[in-house]
Image (spheres, rainbow, N blue to C red):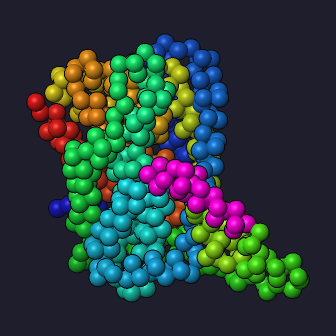
């Protein structure tokens, strides 16, 4: 039955899902309209909020971080040692169901360490699992593998890079995100009460089991139709013609391991300093890029070989470059006009105290469709949620995790974070949304149920 539902949902989304850029533009129009209708914003004020420094251009640095995560991760995966390791992992499954479950399990595990790591590892493993299954004659449904590779983005906020719980651990961050007045009445919440608390360990641990199991059950069997990776040429490209051999001294030096002497010492020192000064528990995009860059250079063996790998990878970054500014504009309108706060507060206020964490979770999921950023969402919804928790005498940590779960939940419908995965795997959003919609349904029921049980007196 689940396989039938998955096929029908996939057919539905393939027939109805627009191109991600069309969706980004459509969401922009919807948000501008809502700002004028709901908040009484004038058209000029709405456009100013959309294109200002807190709107259209506010994510330029973050966009570059995402481009670098994509291209440095792609280049790292193109090295011989990493290819060998991925192929060894991809050789373990005996059928398509095991392949999908393994991709989801690894992607979620990586995402719990760090969301960016989970995104790139899930995408690369899905692609190379598809290639390995095709070589071995294993019937693996490639769109399901790609969806499984994205599953980590529904679990990441309960892991070590979760923005909301991290930003509640120190008094300066509490004041910065909640405001000085509210922060004066709120103590910092230790990580051991949020991410490492029993409630989150059960909730996130359950997702880590449920989603791979769901992938296993959704995999086609018997005579069910299967789309292998060969149906997606962009994901099955070869390495192209070999470059010509070096003929000059500079070319030979550029392809020599000695060229790395110029850059590896400062890079390696920077990596060591990061772990000494910050630690693995505070991984962020710049640190991931630094490690991917350093490892990629070492494993490619020369500056020119690495530059060529980056050039090959950069072809896949167009979606990020084009669409991230539009989502930044949407976030700017939502924040500057008060629309995000209105949506979050309105839905959360509809239920009694026992259901407040559940309605906060639902409202966070709704806001995430328009503000697909953990930090941006906590800045908008955090003060509302924490103030209500105080008024209702609820544990702050439960409300923090309710916002975190809602933020990650609707990533399964929001293509913003899927853009790097779509670029690497070669699938389109409409190919995976049928499966991620089922992840959304099952995961949403689990997270809402867990929050409800934790709120019991």
Give x and y (percent) for residue 363: 32, 31
Q: Quadrant of residue 57?
A: top right
Give x and y (percent) for residue 67: 61, 54
Q: Residue furthest left?
A: 457
Q: In this rendering, is residue 81 above or below 306?
A: below
Magenta-drawn segment: 263-289
Relative side of 312 to 259, left or right: left
Confirm whether residue 282 shows in the render. yes
User: Of residues 117 and 346, which is closer to you in this image?
Assistant: 117
Residue 419: say if magenta: no
Tell me what residue is drawn at x 48 percent, y 34 percent: 376
Q: In this rendering, is residue 6 above or below 164?
A: below
Confirm whether residue 442 shows in the render. no
User: Of residues 35 and 251, which is closer to you in this image?
Assistant: 251
Give x and y (percent) for residue 444: 25, 45
Residue 273: say if magenta: yes
Tell me what residue is drawn at x 35 percent, y 61 percent: 109
Relative side of 129 to 422, left or right: left
Tell me what residue is drawn at x 46 percent, y 21 percent: 179
Name the quarter where the N terminus is drawn: bottom left
Give x and y (percent) for residue 201: 24, 50
Classified by dominant secondary structure, the portion drawn in magenta counts as helix
Q: Quadrant of residue 210?
A: bottom left
Q: In this rendering, is residue 40 above or below 311?
A: above
Tell me what residue is drawn at x 77 percent, y 75 percent: 259
Q: Residue furthest front?
A: 276
User: Of residues 298 and 450, which is closer to you in this image?
Assistant: 298
How many discs appear?
Answer: 0
Relative side of 389 to 311, left or right: left
């Amino acid at each position: 039955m689940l396989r039938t539902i998955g096929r029908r949902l996939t057919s539905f989304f393939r027939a109805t899902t627009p191109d991600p850029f069309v969706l980004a533009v459509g969401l922009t129009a919807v948000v501008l309209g809502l700002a004028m209708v709901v908040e009484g914003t004038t058209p000029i004020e709405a456009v100013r909020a959309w294109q200002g420094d807190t709107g259209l251009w506010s994510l330029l640095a973050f966009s570059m971080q995402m481009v670098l995560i994509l291209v440095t991760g792609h280049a790292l995966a193109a090295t011989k040692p990493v290819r060998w390791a991925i192929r060894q992992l991809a050789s373990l499954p005996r059928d398509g169901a095991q392949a999908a479950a393994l991709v989801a399990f690894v992607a979620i595990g990586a995402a719990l360490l760090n969301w960016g790591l989970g995104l790139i590892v899930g995408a690369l493993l899905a692609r190379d699992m598809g290639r390995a299954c095709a070589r071995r004659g294993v019937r693996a449904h490639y769109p399901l593998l790609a969806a499984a590779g994205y599953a980590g983005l529904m679990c990441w906020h309960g892991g070590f890079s979760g923005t909301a719980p991290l930003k509640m651990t120190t008094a300066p961050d509490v004041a910065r995100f909640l405001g000085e007045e509210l922060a004066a009445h709120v103590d910092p919440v230790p990580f051991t009460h949020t991410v490492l608390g029993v409630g989150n360990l059960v909730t996130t641990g359950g997702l880590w089991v449920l989603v791979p199991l769901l992938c296993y059950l959704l995999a086609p069997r018997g005579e069910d139709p299967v789309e292998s990776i060969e149906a997606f040429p962009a994901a099955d490209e070869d390495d192209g013609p070999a470059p010509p051999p070096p003929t000059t001294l500079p070319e030979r030096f550029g392809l020599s391991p000695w060229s790395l002497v110029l850059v590896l010492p400062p890079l390696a020192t920077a990596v060591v300093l990061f772990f000494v000064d910050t630690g693995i528990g505070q991984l962020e995009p710049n640190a991931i890029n630094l490690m991917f860059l350093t490892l990629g250079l070492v494993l490619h063996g020369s500056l020119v070989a690495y530059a060529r790998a980056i050039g090959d990878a950069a072809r896949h970054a167009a979606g990020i470059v084009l669409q991230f500014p539009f989502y930044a504009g949407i976030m700017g309108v939502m924040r500057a006009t008060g629309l995000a706060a209105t949506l979050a507060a309105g839905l959360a206020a509809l239920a009694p105290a026992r259901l407040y964490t559940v309605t906060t979770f639902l409202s966070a999921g709704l806001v995430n469709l328009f503000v697909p950023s953990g930090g941006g969402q906590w800045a908008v919804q955090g003060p509302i949620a924490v103030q209500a928790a105080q008024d209702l005498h609820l544990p702050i940590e439960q409300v923090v995790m309710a916002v975190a779960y809602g933020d990650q939940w609707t990533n399964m419908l929001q293509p913003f974070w899927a853009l790097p995965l779509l670029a690497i795997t070669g699938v389109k959003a409409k190919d995976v949304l049928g499966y991620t919609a089922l992840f959304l349904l099952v995961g949403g029921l689990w997270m809402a149920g867990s929050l409800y049980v934790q709120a019991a007196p």
